[in-house]
Each structure stands twice: as structure tokens, then as C-alpha cells.
């Protein structure tokens, strides 16, 4: 994201809460920055969805930079690493929670399904890479699919969480991660049992 895009987006987020995402909102944001309204079109020639994509991808970059600078994920268990990534990502948007709600509603529209899936994948992929994931087989995709479900359900709790320091969101997230871990352990045990029972394994 370049400086022009960042300036306009920063000014747009408070306006999105009341006016929603539109080129008119981006133009008003440009004006509030002392820029010409046409600079909004220059910054986001592909329109509002490009602005949303820039905001999401920039949040992922910030998350990665903060995790690298301020956290020691390699000293944590994998579930703690993932929880840390998810909570940091949500806390980044805390000052703009209503804008995030508006964004989620827009991305939920059927005609935005492709971009929504792409942005969600980018987010969970960044989280797994920050957590040290090195999988290259089928687990690469299954891990991201599972985390996408965990992240989306936690995001919905976060949208309405007024507890101190997002305690309710964090508690929900930890339960969801624990549920996933138990399912994965069960699947691994069943896979091992089935292999031992197969005719090939008995020879």
C-alpha cells in the first residue's frame, strides 16, 4: 500500500462507520486530508473493493511485523501461537470495529465471494506462516481451512465483545482451538487404527 492509499484509507475509516464504503466516502476522505477528490480515484482506480483489499492486506503486514518485533512465538506451543496471531489481528482493528463490521457485511455479498475468499486465505496463511508452519502436503490446505473457520467464528464474537481487554473473545477462541485440536487428534488416531487394520498392513 502506498502513502496516498494509506492516507485516504486512514481518513476514510471513521466515515465508513456512518456512510458505508463508497467512492463518495473515499472522496470525502481525500478532501479531509487536503487532497483533491479525484485523488481517491487515483489511489483506488479499481474502486471501493480495492480499498478494502488494501486495508486487509496492510493489516496482515502490520500483524506480521508486530509478531516478529514484539513476540517470541517460537517459545510457545502451536495453539498459543495461533491464538496470539488471531487476537493480535483483531486488536489491530479494535479502534475501527464498526468499519470492520461494514467491511464484513460488504464482503458477505455473493458478488464479492471471490475477493472475500482470497482475503480470508491471505489472512490465515499469514498467521500460519508467522506460527512457523512448514507443511507442503495436504496439511497445508487443511490447516488453513480449519483456521479460517476458527477465525471467522471468533471475528463474529469480537464484533460484539464489550468485555475488558476482549476477555470473552479470547476465551471463545481458546475453546475453538481446543476443539479443533481434539478433532485432529481423533482423526490421527482413527487413521492409524485403519492403517493397522488394512490387509496391506498385516503382511
Image: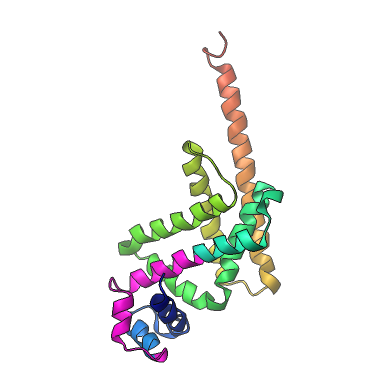
Res. 151 visible in picture: yes
As displayed, is residue 71 above or below residue 103?
above
Compared across the picture, whether 9 is left or right of 80 comes to: left
- Residue at the top extreme of this rendering: 203
* Residue 196 rendering spot, x and y as whole percentages: 59, 18
Q: Nearer the viewer, residue 10 or 197?
A: 10
Quarter in which the N terminus is drawn: bottom left
Quarter in which the C terminus is drawn: top right
Residue drawn at point x = 57 percent, y = 17 percent: 197
* Residue 128 rendering spot, x and y as whole percentages: 55, 50
Compared across the picture, whether 73 is left or right of 153 comes to: right
Q: Which of 2 and 26 is in front in this view?
A: 2
Residue drawn at point x = 44 percent, y = 85 percent: 15
As displayed, is residue 24 above or below residue 86?
below
As displayed, is residue 96 above or below residue 104?
below
Range of magenta residues: 32-59
Q: Give the quarter of the image for residue 116.
A: bottom left
Amino acid at each position: 500500500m502506498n502513502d496516498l492509499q494509506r492516507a485516504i484509507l486512514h481518513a476514510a475509516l471513521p466515515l465508513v462507520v456512518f456512510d458505508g464504503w463508497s467512492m463518495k466516502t473515499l472522496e470525502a476522505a481525500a478532501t479531509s486530508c487536503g487532497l483533491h477528490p479525484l485523488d481517491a480515484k487515483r489511489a483506488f482506480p479499481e474502486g471501493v473493493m480495492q480499498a478494502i483489499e488494501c486495508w486487509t492486506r496492510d493489516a496482515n503486514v502490520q500483524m506480521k511485523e508486530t509478531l516478529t518485533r514484539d513476540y517470541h512465538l517460537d517459545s510457545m506451543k502451536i495453539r498459543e501461537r495461533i491464538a496470539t496471531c488471531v487476537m493480535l489481528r483483531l486488536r489491530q482493528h479494535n479502534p475501527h470495529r464498526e468499519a470492520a463490521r461494514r467491511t464484513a457485511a460488504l464482503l458477505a455479498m455473493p458478488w464479492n465471494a471471490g475477493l472475500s475468499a482470497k482475503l480470508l486465505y491471505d489472512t490465515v496463511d499469514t498467521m500460519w506462516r508467522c506460527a512457523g508452519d512448514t507443511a507442503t502436503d495436504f496439511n497445508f490446505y487443511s490447516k488453513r481451512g480449519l483456521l479460517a473457520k476458527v477465525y471467522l467464528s471468533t471475528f463474529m464474537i469480537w464484533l460484539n465483545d464489550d468485555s475488558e481487554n476482549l476477555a470473552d473473545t479470547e476465551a471463545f477462541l481458546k475453546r475453538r482451538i481446543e476443539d479443533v485440536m481434539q478433532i485432529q487428534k481423533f482423526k490421527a488416531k482413527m487413521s492409524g487404527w485403519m492403517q493397522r487394520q488394512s490387509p496391506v498392513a498385516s503382511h
